[in-house]
Image (cartoon, rainbow, N blue to C red):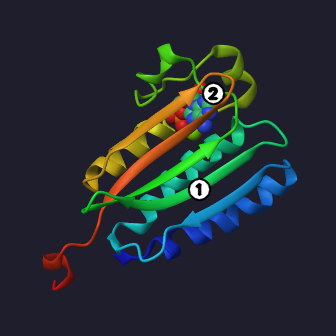
Amino acid sequence: QPISLEHLLKPVYERFSMTCKQKEIVLTLSIEEDLPIVVVDRDKLDQVLDNVISNAVKYTPEAGSIKIKAEQHGEKHVQVSIEDTGLGIPKQDLGRLFERFYRVDKARSRTLGGTGLGLSIAQEIIHSHGGDIWIDSEYTKGTTVFFTLPVRSEASGMD
Ligand code: ATP
Ligand code: MG
């Protein structure tokens, strides 16, 4: 469905606000003005956002912060980013995060749970929407997950 970034991100933001408050993590949402509409399968996008943001919450200790942002990315895409001040990911693992069942560091994985499927599913969903997803991280400092979505084209607006 055609949807604005506000409509896509606001509910997820509100859903995670509670959890973050309990963990004393500051969660913020900022959406650039006048962003174009995107056309997405909303349930699928929610699944991506749920996983990426719950990763951020899971791997960010108390008193950290998580920033959700949406901005224009070139003429034809919108970029969403989720930036945290958590544990970070070592350089040598960055290339493998989208592999199924891949998880960084056994000790961390044992205590924090999960199957290692979240990001591979997220990648599949974003690719099927014609977007891209990538991760930037500095070990011990924090992580940012970026993804892009194509904006609604003239043609798709006329159905
Ligand atoms: P699942 O999502 O299936 O419950 P998971 O969260 O372990 O399990 P992914 O979401 O695919 O799996 O993430 C893969 C690995 O990437 C994680 O195990 C974790 O080590 C690392 N990771 C993902 N997001 C972050 C983040 N924001 N900060 C630090 N490490 C992260
Ligand atoms: Mg996950």
Q: Nearer the viewer, residue 83 or 53?
A: 83
Task: Find ligand 2 in the image and state its quadrant.
Answer: top right
Q: Where, quadrant-wise, is the C terminus in this rendering?
A: bottom left
Left or right side of 80 for 126: left
Q: Residue at x 63, y 27 (%)?
A: 88
Three-letter code, disc 2: Gly
Residue at the spot of label 1: 68
Residue 134 appears in the rendering: yes
Left or right side of 129 for 116: right
Looking at this rendering, what residue extends furthest in the left direction?
A: 155
Judge: label 2 CB < 8 Å from ligand 1. yes
Precedes in sequence: disc 2 or disc 1: 1
Q: Residue at x 51, y 17 (%)?
A: 91
Residue at the spot of label 2: 88
Q: Quadrant of residue 96?
A: top left
User: Can you give x and y, in whole percent of width and height, for residue 131 in the image?
Assistant: 30, 51
Q: Which mark is residue 89?
A: none
Q: CA distance from mark 2 to mark 1?
A: 17 Å
